[in-house]
């Protein structure tokens, strides 16, 4: 068995794991950045209101403050840095990377 077949088999298993069983790329409290442009859901202070969406450019920075788990998906909860008012958003886990300091 070649190393490539072992690696591709491991990658296939990782892609099919439910989101909550995949290893986390960042821990709560870590500084993170967006690895790609993203349309993100803005967290609402008023439950029951319709979702609001906002565009964030690749390279936007923030602090990971938690995870929102739903069936077959996991979203990072990020407090975005550099905004005049506090901005908390939900971002696809794949779009978040640890920030290099």
Image (spheres, rainbow, N blue to C red):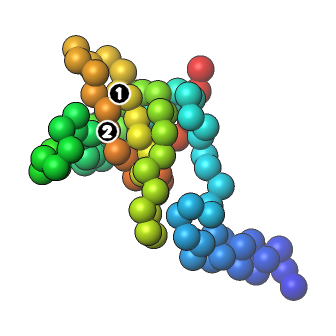
Compared across the picture, whether 37 is left or right of 61 comes to left
Q: Residues within 10 Å of mark 2 (few under 14, many from 20)?
A: many
Which residue sits furthest bottom? Answer: 1
**Most extreme residue toward the front, as rendered?**
47
What element does badge 2 sit on? strand
User: For mark 2, what is the residue?
Assistant: 89
Q: Are marks 2 and 1 in contact (CB under 8 Å)?
A: yes
How crowded is the residue under tag 1: few (<14 C-alpha within 10 Å), some, or many (20+)?
many
Image position, residue 7 (x, y; %): 74, 72
Residue 30 found in image quarter:
top right
Mark positioned earlier in the residue sequence (2 or 1): 1
Q: Is residue 17 above or below residue 36?
A: below
At horizontal 59% and vertical 20% (from top left) the residue drawn is: 101
Instruction: Name the secondary structure under disc 1.
Output: strand
The residue located at (47%, 27%) in the rendering is 63
- Answer left or right for 22 relative to 75: right
Q: Check the picture and name the quadrant holding the N terminus.
A: bottom right
Whole-angstrom CA distance, mark 2 to mark 1, is: 7 Å
Residue underneath mark 1: 80
Coordinates of residue 78 in the picture (x, y in percent): 40, 35
Displayed quadrant of residue 6: bottom right
Residue ID at (60%, 72%)? 17
């Amino acid at each position: 068995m070649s190393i490539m077949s072992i690696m591709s088999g491991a990658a296939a298993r990782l892609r099919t794991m439910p989101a909550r069983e995949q290893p986390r790329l960042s821990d709560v409290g870590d500084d993170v950045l967006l690895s790609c442009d993203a349309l993100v859901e803005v967290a609402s202070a008023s439950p029951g209101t319709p979702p609001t969406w906002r565009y964030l450019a690749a390279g936007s920075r923030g602090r990971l403050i938690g995870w929102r788990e739903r069936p077959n998906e996991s979203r990072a909860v990020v407090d975005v840095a550099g905004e005049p008012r506090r901005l908390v958003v939900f971002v696809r886990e794949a779009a978040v990377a640890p920030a290099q300091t």
